[in-house]
Image: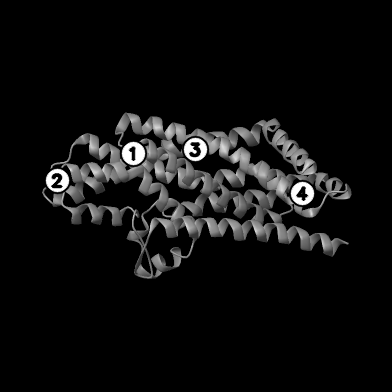
Amino acid sequence: MKQLSALVKRNTKLYFRDKGMFFTSLITPLILLVLYGTFLGNIYEDTFRGALQAAGASVPDGLIGGCVGGELASSLLAVCCVTVAFCSNVLMVQDKVSGARRDLTVAPVRRGTLALGYYIANLLSTLLVCYGAVAVCLLYLSRVGWYLTGTDVALLLLDVLLLVLFGCALSSVIHFFLSTQGQISAVGTVVSAGYGFLCGAYMPISQFSDGLQKAISLLPGTYGTSLLRNHCLRGVFQEMGNQGFPAEIVEAIRDSVDCNLYFFGDKVETGAMYLALGGAVILLVALYVLLNLLRGRKEK
């Protein structure tokens, strides 16, 4: 335990000491919020207004603001929890490049302990940035339309924790196979560009083809995005019901923004989403530790 604690402290200090790596991770959520608000905000607003006005419903601006803000906030957090994890986990590969990893393996430290040291340090760093992003999102929602309760906020924090655990585990497994700075940049670019589409953050999964929807429903990150959507927009949908919106219209909107997900035609309940995401975290962490143990045996 002392060795693990020392490794976590060492990795965390090095992360914050590298100003470039830290500020890149820190400003990522702010950049995404500006981009989402600029380019996606009007699209989301037109979509909500069109769906509600087609049903002959009068839509208050505050309610539209809550809809748009909730979708933007959930999209931003869904992407940040994974992309920031990849940014802050660069230290694991940099230690290979600099030779520091070789020095650590010479010391009497178990491979599993060394692997967990990187993972926990990555988790702490990513959580710091992502919870900062949550604070920014909550401030944004308070300005455009606040319909959250204390329970919604608590569940939102839980969703972010689970997605960060997933993002750190995924980045650890992928970074395990990297050994150069060029590979780090290439993987970071691919993840930043592609993950938002795969998890349904940039475009709702309901707008994809049936085959692509079924393929994406196999990915754990999809359920993390849906959990964030549900807890950011629950109050908005409740307010719609209070104002007399027909239940079928509200349910159709929930389908359109991926609050309702379907696994090969069957609706996925919230509990199943948590199980899918939590199970993926456990499997990825176990795989990451196993890979380190196997490499240690091979080197011996």
The numbered mark at residue 135 is none
Q: Which residue is mark 2?
A: 244
- Say if 191 sits above or below 262 in the image: above
Secondary structure, mark 4, is: helix
The structure residue drawn at horizontal position 62% and vertical position 58%, both measured from the top left corner, is 284
The answer to whether any part of residue 1 appears in the image is: yes
Q: Which residue is mark 3?
A: 29
Q: Amino acid at mark 2?
A: Gly
Query: How crowded is the residue under tag 4: few (<14 C-alpha within 10 Å), some, or many (20+)?
Result: many
The answer to whether any part of residue 201 appears in the image is: no
Q: Amino acid at mark 3?
A: Pro
Query: Reading the chain from its start, which is encountered first: label 3 or label 1?
Result: 3
Task: Work out which residue is located at the far left of the displayed protein and give it.
Answer: 56
Q: Amino acid at mark 1?
A: Gly
Residue 76 placed where, x, y %? 44, 43
Give the Cα separation between the discs numbered 3 and 1: 15 Å
Front one among 93 and 268: 268
Q: Which residue is mark 4?
A: 114
